[in-house]
Image: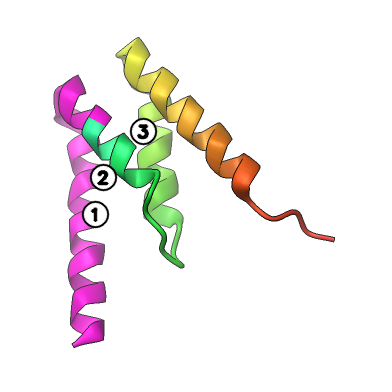
Amino acid sequence: MCSLSLLYAAIVLERLAYMMDDAISDIKFSILSGIRDLERKDKRTKDYILQKGRTDNHCLVRNLAEEITESLSLNKPEAD
């Protein structure tokens, strides 16, 4: 059952990543706001979504993606 929910989560994240290409800015704001709270071991999709946000045409989407990227990088534990 747990592996099935992980599979569904991966599918949803992939779909959200595709939506970052063509969705209106309101939807992109929602995706980026939700990505902040996402905790997964595989960070590739999360990083991809943030990258799409940082290169978006809409300046507010870019600013939000930059803010989230900075806050996530500040929260990372530093390697000794």
In the rendered image of this protein, does residue 63 appear above or below residue 50? above
Task: Tell me the residue that label 3 is attached to.
Answer: 52
Dividing the image into 4 quarters, which one contains the C terminus?
Answer: bottom right
Q: Are marks 1 and 2 in contact (CB under 8 Å)?
A: yes
- Magenta highlight on residue 11: yes
Furthest residue in direction bottom, as rendered: 1
Residue at x-position 42% and y-position 29%? 65
Q: Amino acid at mark 3?
A: Lys
In the rendering, at what x and y percent does residue 78 appear?
75, 54
Of mark 1 and mark 3, the one earlier in the sequence is 1
Q: Left or right of 63: which side holds 27?
A: left
- Magenta highlight on residue 39: no
Residue 8 sits in quarter: bottom left
Could you classify mark 1 by the number of other residues whose Cα lies within 10 Å: few (under 14), some (14-19), or many (20 or more)?
some
Colour scheme of the rendered structure = rainbow
Q: CA distance from mark 1 to mark 3?
A: 13 Å
In the rendering, at what x and y percent does residue 16 appear?
21, 46
Task: Tell me the residue that label 2 is attached to.
Answer: 17
Q: CA distance from mark 1 to mark 2?
A: 5 Å
Could you classify mark 2 by the number of other residues whose Cα lies within 10 Å: few (under 14), some (14-19), or many (20 or more)?
many
Extent of the magenta region: 1-29
Q: CA distance from mark 3 to mark 2?
A: 8 Å
Furthest residue in direction right, as rendered: 80
Dividing the image into 4 quarters, which one contains the N terminus?
Answer: bottom left
